Amino acid sequence: MTLNDIPLLSHPSLTALKLQKVKIGVFARPSVRPLPYENLDSFYLHARDYSYEVLNRFLKNAKSLRHLEFHHPFDVSARRDPPDFSELLCLCKSSLKILELWWECMGTLCFNNPGMKFAEFTTLEYLAIPPGALFGPYWYENNLESLQMLKDHIPPNLKVLFLQDVYPCWSEEELEEDIEEDCDPEAILLPNDYKLIKTLLTNVNSFPSLRYIVWTSEIGTRPPKDLNDMARDLGMALKLVSNRLEMPPDVKWLDKL
């Protein structure tokens, strides 16, 4: 896109916008004003050259936004400091219902940012995001204050938490006798991931609407039996899924949860 294309998108009455595989870096120029998107309801973005400044031009006035779907391209390496969407979306924290932040890039996701805090997003019911983008580099942190971190970063009325690319580790348990010797050992959750999920389940009063905790993983990292049983007793579900298509956001379905 060029500066000449910007007027084509500057319509205050626009309620839905989809930008896919387009260049949007021009929006970062100081001469470009935030778009008049007070009535924007849904926004889909798949672009290579996004930045905090570019995203701010689109979201600065989006006070009515209910659904944002963002895709980081497969062929672009992930930056270690992703834009903080909890800051970019602060104007619509009382309207946003579905937030999908997908990093579909090659290689391991590794973020150094302090995470994104969605505690004030009271209408957010579906959140899909890599755990490192949500919580920051928490995996190997000693003495993790898991409950306070969850309260700071997870919306209070969330119904579905979808974690993209949960890191696996290897079980130290011996393989069963009936399994072939060259079989890969079972992948399990990292200790801090286990702790976070257990903390969610043992503090349901802080997240009373939560019904699903799902994740993808490069290696099949299934829910531990004890956490699975705990979730089932609470009327919740833990699920390992292969991709986002297994748990897509649907407004009618969310309303019924």
Image (cartoon, helix red, strand yellow):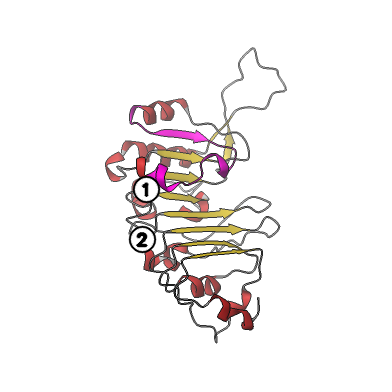
Q: Is residue 17 left or right of residue 25?
A: left
Q: Nearer the viewer, residue 130 or 9?
A: 9
Query: The C terminus appears in which quarter of the rendering?
Result: top left
Specify whether residue 136 is in view: no
In this rendering, the answer to whether 251 lies above or below 202 is below
The residue at which mark 2 appears reads as 95
The residue at which mark 1 appears reads as 158
Q: Is residue 252 magenta?
A: yes
Extent of the magenta region: 233-254
Q: Is residue 56 left or right of residue 48?
A: left
**Circles 2 and 1: CB distance less than 8 Å?**
no
Q: Nearer the viewer, residue 91 or 1?
A: 1
Residue 200 position within the rendered picture, expressed as x and y whole percent measured from the top left: 36, 41
Q: Is residue 245 magenta?
A: yes
Instruction: Identify the mark at residue 63; answer none if there is no mark.
Output: none
Residue 228 position within the rendered picture, expressed as x and y whole percent measured from the top left: 43, 28
Residue 211 position within the rendered picture, expressed as x and y whole percent measured from the top left: 38, 38
Rendering quarter of residue 207: top left
Q: What residue lies at 44% left-to-right and 73% top-to-bottom? A: 13
Residue type, label 2: Ser
- Which of the two marks, 2 or 1, is nearer to us in this view? 2
Q: Secondary structure at mark 2?
A: loop
In this rendering, the answer to whether 174 lies above or below 36 is above
Label 1 CA crowd tier, 10 Å (few <14, some 14–19, many 20+): many
First reached walking from the N terminus: tag 2 or tag 1? 2
